[in-house]
Image (spheres, helix red, strand yellow):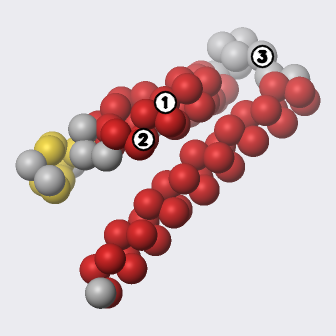
Amino acid sequence: MYYKQNNIDIIKTHDLIALCQLCMTIDNSFSNMLDCCSRLNPYGVAVRYPNELSVDETIAKNAIIMAQKVHGFCYEKIDTLINDKKQ
């Protein structure tokens, strides 16, 4: 399914790198999230298949920290957009 916003075709995907790069075309501050997205990207699909990705407790904890960072960043962006539209 494709959506049109800001003159960009947005596709439904689990690829965090592609999504982050797409967001960067609208707001370059998403470049701050590119490293986290790159590190998190394998967890979107690879962990669903046996023997594709080995994850120990330390790796899992680091992934959670990165995911929380990306989530917080995106949440703030959405909150800002909502508040800007109210004004």
Q: Quadrant of the C terminus?
A: bottom left
Quadrant assignment, res 41? top right
Q: Which residue is mark 3?
A: 54
Q: Residue at x 31, y 87 (%)?
A: 86
Quadrant assignment, res 82? bottom left
Q: Nearer the viewer, residue 23 or 1?
A: 23
Viewer-side label of 2, 3: 2
Q: Nearer the viewer, residue 66 or 47?
A: 66
Farthest residue to the bottom: give it: 87
Answer whether labels 2 and 1 touch (C-beta < 8 Å).
yes
* Residue type, label 3: Ser
Q: Residue at x 44, y 60 (%)?
A: 77
* Residue type, label 1: Leu
Quadrant assignment, res 20? top left
Q: Which residue is mark 1?
A: 34
Query: Where's residue 1, x and y in %?
Result: 21, 48
Is residue 37 visible in this depiction of the protein? yes
Q: Which residue is mark 2?
A: 30
The answer for how far apart the CA atoms under marks 1 and 3 are is 22 Å
Viewer-side label of 1, 3: 1
The answer for how far apart the CA atoms under marks 2 and 3 are is 28 Å
- Which one is earlier in the sequence, the residue at label 1 or at label 3? 1
Query: Where's residue 2, x and y in %?
Result: 17, 48
Farthest residue to the top: give it: 51
Q: Is residue 55 left or right of residue 68?
A: right
Element under label 2?
helix
* Residue type, label 2: Phe
